[in-house]
Amino acid sequence: MSIKVHAYEISRTFHLRNDQGRNVALPVLEGFNLDIREGEFLSLLGPSGCGKSTFLNMLAGFEDFDSGEIQVDGEPLKKQDFNRGMVFQSYALLPWRTVRSNLEIALEIRHIPRAERHNIARHFLARVGLTPFANQYPHQLSGGMRQRVAIARVLAYNPSLLLMDEPFGALDAQTREDLQLELLRIWEDDKKTILFVTHSIDEAVLLSDRVAIMSARPGTISEIINIDLPRPRNEDIRGSAEFARIRQYAWRRLKHEVTRPNEFTGGEGI
């Protein structure tokens, strides 16, 4: 299987001001190495503040890195690239545009003709079960429906790499589980490469081919766990002995990292 994303020795330090007004260095990533395979579903798990979202934002082109190298499809990372798509926790829908119009934003930027845009939007609304809501506005939808729109909007312009930053974190438990299964169904159909950031061990195990455990800050990859559960997966897999075994192992590894002290105290001047 070919490598979709290659990250080598990535380091990133933020420069902040502490309560005493002194400049301090906050190392977020240090010696971060990760290969993501073409077509795989890989999740990042780690303690809060370990740099999960920072790395995701680097891949999206929103964040710089101080040293190291990131390649996508064997080429140096580009700041802007329609082959990468991002799904946020906060939906990021434009409130003055309808559901269909929100789906068409990236297609407009790419100068896709109107009739073709409408057909593409219609197709992806059907895939996420929102055809009856095409002419509604975001405030008229539930949180789960808004996130379906956000996912459909990214899929509509057909990126080969999908970046997801805790997309279900703000949803209630039932809606979250429903959307996890919806995402699995879409991924099984399309086999896009997905990098998924989450704080939920259950979610990571259910969805992923592999789960990368990150260390406490400054973040690096401490272990990658292969999720050897059969596909396609459904809600019944959660009750299996193998799911419980993998979940327990991932929990122990994550707990080890959460209890490790990080290197930033806020007191060192630079």
Image (cartoon, helix red, strand yellow):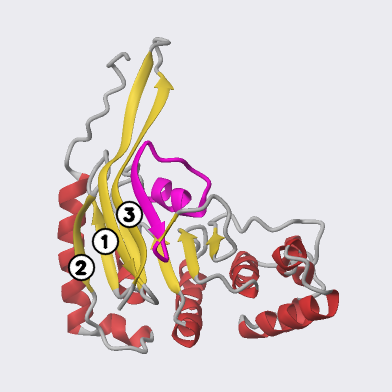
Q: CA distance from mark 2 to mark 1?
A: 6 Å
112 lies left or right of 21: right
Confirm or deny contact between disc 2 and disc 1 (CB under 8 A): yes
Q: Position of residue 228 (x, y in %)?
A: 22, 81
Q: Amino acid at mark 2?
A: Ile
129 lies left or right of 203: right
Q: Which residue position holds label 2?
A: 225
How crowded is the residue under tag 3: few (<14 C-alpha within 10 Å), some, or many (20+)? some
Q: CA distance from mark 3 to mark 2?
A: 18 Å
Q: Amino acid at mark 3?
A: Ala
Q: Which residue position holds label 3?
A: 7
Mark number, residue 212: 1
Indicate the secondary structure of the residue bearing disc 3: strand
Please state, as top left, top right, bottom left or bottom right, where the N terminus lies in the image: bottom left
Towards the viewer: 28 or 47: 28
User: Which callout, 1 or 3, points at the residue further toward the start of the chain?
Assistant: 3
Q: Residue furthest front?
A: 75
Please state, as top left, top right, bottom left or bottom right, where the C terminus lies in the image: top left
Residue 2 position (above or below residue 189): above
Question: What is the total number of numbered labels drawn onto the structure image?
Answer: 3
Q: Residue at x 40, y 64 (%)?
A: 195
The magenta region covers 52-74
Q: Position of residue 257 (x, y in %)?
A: 19, 48
Q: Amino acid at mark 1?
A: Ala
Q: Residue at x 40, y 24 (%)?
A: 15
23 lies left or right of 219: right
Towards the viewer: 175 or 204: 204
Confirm or deny contact between disc 3 and disc 2 (CB under 8 A): no
Q: CA distance from mark 1 to mark 3?
A: 13 Å
User: Which callout, 3 or 2, points at the residue further toward the start of the chain?
Assistant: 3
How crowded is the residue under tag 1: few (<14 C-alpha within 10 Å), some, or many (20+)? many
Q: Residue 71 lies in magenta, yes or no?
A: yes
